[in-house]
Image (cartoon, grey):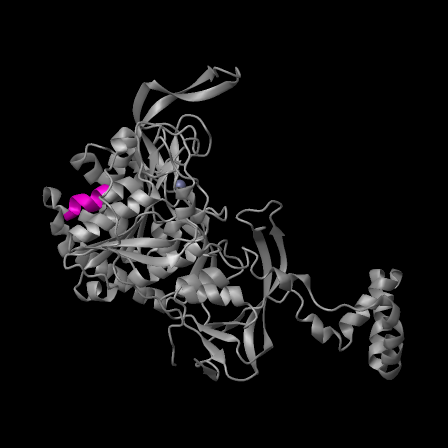
């Protein structure tokens, strides 16, 4: 089987010496967060000053400016292949996805400058890993600065907008990729194939004593050995490092069911359209830091910086094990013949965490006089509470050998290619025996989200049948690096998939229909010439009350029992076919 990578990505030369002036100071302790221009000029100066540092321009965003990527490697390497050949792990840190939550923008700049200056001997971590930083991902949002975004957040003075130039929330756009930003990100991700990934945020949920809260990849999504390492070593070590090395205890992201005193923390259900959901499709160890909005800005930056430091340190010290676990996981992914497209929380299993909260009390609000609850900072407490972070599969699919996506579905093909999916095209019009889905029902959302009327609650039937395909239709073998992306996107029941995000909606509108006026005379001729059909029709009129009493139902019965019904088989037939264990893919070109 000959396969070709259809989406090419390349690096262009470093950007040092673009005539920038001196690097701006980091002033997060004065409540100032770097602007996009300041961030780029900061990294550009580091690029000029240090041989280990390179600032690159990558793909275009909706803001008309390219995403930058800053790479720190001990020998200045930027080619991920070369870095991997040297046996080093790669850490990717993404910042400013929500530019109103800019801690990571400042913390990563501080981290890069400190590491390059070998502060506290940090350069030693570069022996076993390279660090790649996206200074600002959502450039459009970062350019739209105002003091009033995230208005009840405790600094910085000015911050960017959550949504990008197309008003998309990029932390819902990782797989459907409506934004150029997300497509550029996918190319960076495919190129780097990071072992460890961090996406930096701020949370405005409940109030408590912690500054840094953490979302980590849903462990069940990992290969069992990787999950064991993640739950048993990596996460405990990161929590320990924050507590003991930095005296800044961290807690899992505080997601709760009812507002009020926090009695338990609910694990984050990680859809693939979120950053760590996306990174889990490629078997990376993924994290989101969520620092608490009510803490002073510089404390949030420092907390994020401490976590970055612990993450890079851990990756460097455990690089051999991390690389081996990922290689095993990638192999396991290729071998797996089942895939979980949806998970549900297990309410019978939990861990315990030490929680430093504030008592929740009733109050009367100062302006509107509303009765409301609030977290009383004068009443701190510490309790051990439950943390429900176990999930069970709720929808599992059997992995086909290949999917067939007709040439017509251009946007789907384009996204698959951007995500590194290799595919072939049929050389001839071909009829194939495939497993197909009929969509019996689904619920489109009544309000748009991200410009889509999200389809959910899909009910469908599976039918194995012959389907005619055309020259140029795409065969997508499943056993390849992007396997989990392929399955996540092409299975209609997947909440992150192309069906959910309306990419296939036009097929739901059905086929040709008949005109009531001309149809009867056509049918009379048919019945006159086909006694068996007439007999069956008469029988239906006697036995089926609905057919007996309703002339339209009689026409419908006839339509479905004459050769015209052959066309009906295309009604609600999901356009993507599943080729099951044929022992070979049909005649196709690359
Ligand atoms: Zn966020």
- The answer to whether any part of residue 225 appears in the image is yes
User: In which quadrant will I find the N terminus?
Assistant: bottom left
User: At which x and y percent is residue 231?
Assistant: 27, 48
- The answer to whether any part of residue 283 appears in the image is no
Q: Residue at x 26, y 40 (%)?
A: 107
Relative vertical location of residue 356 with respect to residue 245 in this rendering, above or below: above
User: At which x and y percent is residue 353?
Assistant: 30, 35
User: In which quadrant will I find the C terminus?
Assistant: bottom left
Q: Quadrant of ligand 1?
A: top left
Q: Is residue 378 magenta?
A: no
Relative to 169, is 210 on the left or the right? left
Relative vertical location of residue 546 with respect to residue 452 in this rendering, above or below: below
Relative to 405, is 517 on the left or the right? right
Relative to 334, is 555 on the left or the right? right
Relative vertical location of residue 195 with respect to residue 584 in this rendering, above or below: above
Q: Is residue 114 magenta?
A: yes
Q: Quadrant of residue 503?
A: bottom right
Outermost residue toward the left in this view: 121
Number of marks in the rendered image: 0
* Front position in the image: 559 or 424: 424
* Front position in the image: 201 or 510: 201
Q: Residue at x 76, y 68 (%)?
A: 513
Dominant secondary structure (helix, strand or loop) of the stretch shown in magenta? helix
Q: Residue at x 86, y 81 (%)?
A: 531
User: At which x and y percent is residue 156?
Assistant: 34, 32
User: At which x and y percent is residue 399?
Assistant: 45, 67
The span picked out in magenta is 110-116
Relative to 214, is 407 on the left or the right? right
């Amino acid at each position: 089987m000959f396969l070709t990578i259809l989406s090419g990505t390349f690096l262009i030369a470093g950007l040092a010496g673009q005539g920038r002036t001196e690097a701006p100071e980091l002033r997060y302790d004065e409540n100032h967060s770097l602007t996009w221009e300041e961030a780029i000029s900061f990294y550009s100066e580091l690029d000029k000053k240090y041989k280990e540092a390179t600032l690159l321009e990558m793909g275009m965003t909706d803001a008309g400016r390219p995403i930058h990527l800053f790479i720190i490697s001990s020998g200045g390497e930027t080619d991920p292949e070369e870095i991997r050949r040297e046996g080093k792990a790669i850490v990717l840190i993404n910042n400013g996805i929500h530019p109103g939550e800019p801690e990571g923008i400042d913390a990563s700049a501080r981290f890069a400058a400190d590491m390059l200056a070998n502060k506290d001997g940090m350069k030693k971590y570069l022996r076993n890993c390279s660090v790649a930083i996206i200074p600002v991902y959502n450039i459009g949002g970062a350019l739209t600065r105002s003091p009033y975004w995230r208005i009840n957040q405790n600094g910085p003075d000015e911050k960017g907008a959550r949504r990008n130039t197309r008003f998309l929330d990029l932390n819902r756009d990782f797989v459907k990729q409506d934004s150029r930003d997300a497509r550029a990100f996918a190319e960076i991700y495919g190129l780097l194939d990071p072992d460890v990934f961090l996406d930096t945020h701020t949370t405005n949920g409940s109030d408590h004593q912690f500054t840094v809260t953490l979302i980590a990849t849903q462990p069940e999504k990992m290969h069992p050995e990787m999950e064991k390492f993640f739950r048993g070593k990596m996460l405990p070590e990161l929590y320990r490092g924050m507590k003991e090395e930095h005296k800044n205890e961290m807690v899992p992201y505080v997601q709760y069911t009812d507002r009020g005193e926090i009695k338990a923390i609910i694990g984050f259900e990680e859809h693939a359209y979120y950053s760590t959901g996306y990174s889990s499709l490629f078997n990376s160890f993924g994290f989101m830091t969520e620092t608490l909005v009510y803490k002073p800005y510089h404390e949030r930056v420092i907390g994020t910086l401490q976590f970055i430091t612990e993450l890079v340190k851990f990756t460097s010290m455990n690089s051999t094990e991390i690389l081996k676990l990922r290689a095993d996981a990638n192999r396991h992914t290729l071998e797996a013949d089942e895939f979980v497209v949806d998970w549900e929380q297990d309410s019978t299993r939990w861990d315990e965490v030490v929680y430093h909260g504030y008592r929740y009390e009733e109050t009367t609000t100062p302006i509107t006089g509303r009765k409301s609850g609030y977290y009383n900072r004068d009443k701190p407490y510490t309790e051990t509470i439950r943390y429900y972070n176990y999930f069970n599969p709720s929808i599992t699919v059997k992995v086909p050998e290949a999917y067939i996506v007709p040439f017509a579905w251009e946007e789907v093909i384009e996204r698959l290619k951007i995500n590194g999916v290799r595919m072939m095209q049929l050389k001839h019009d071909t009829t194939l025996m495939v497993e197909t889905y009929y969509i019996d029902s689904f619920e489109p959302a009544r309000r748009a989200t991200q410009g889509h009327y999200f389809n959910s609650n899909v009910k469908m039937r599976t039918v194995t049948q012959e389907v005619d395909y055309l020259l140029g239709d795409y065969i997508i073998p499943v056993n390849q690096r992007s396997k989990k992306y392929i399955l996540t996107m092409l299975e209609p029941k997947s909440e992150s998939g192309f069906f959910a995000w309306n990419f296939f909606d036009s097929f739901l509108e059905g086929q040709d229909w008949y005109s009531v006026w001309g149809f009867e005379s056509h049918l009379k001729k048919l019945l006159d010439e086909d006694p068996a059909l007439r007999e069956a029709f008469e029988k239906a009129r006697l036995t089926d009350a609905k057919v007996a009493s309703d002339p339209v139902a009689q026409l419908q019965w006839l339509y479905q029992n004459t050769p015209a019904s052959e066309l009906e088989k295309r009604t609600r037939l999901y356009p993507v076919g599943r080729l099951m264990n044929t022992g070979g893919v049909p005649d196709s070109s690359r």
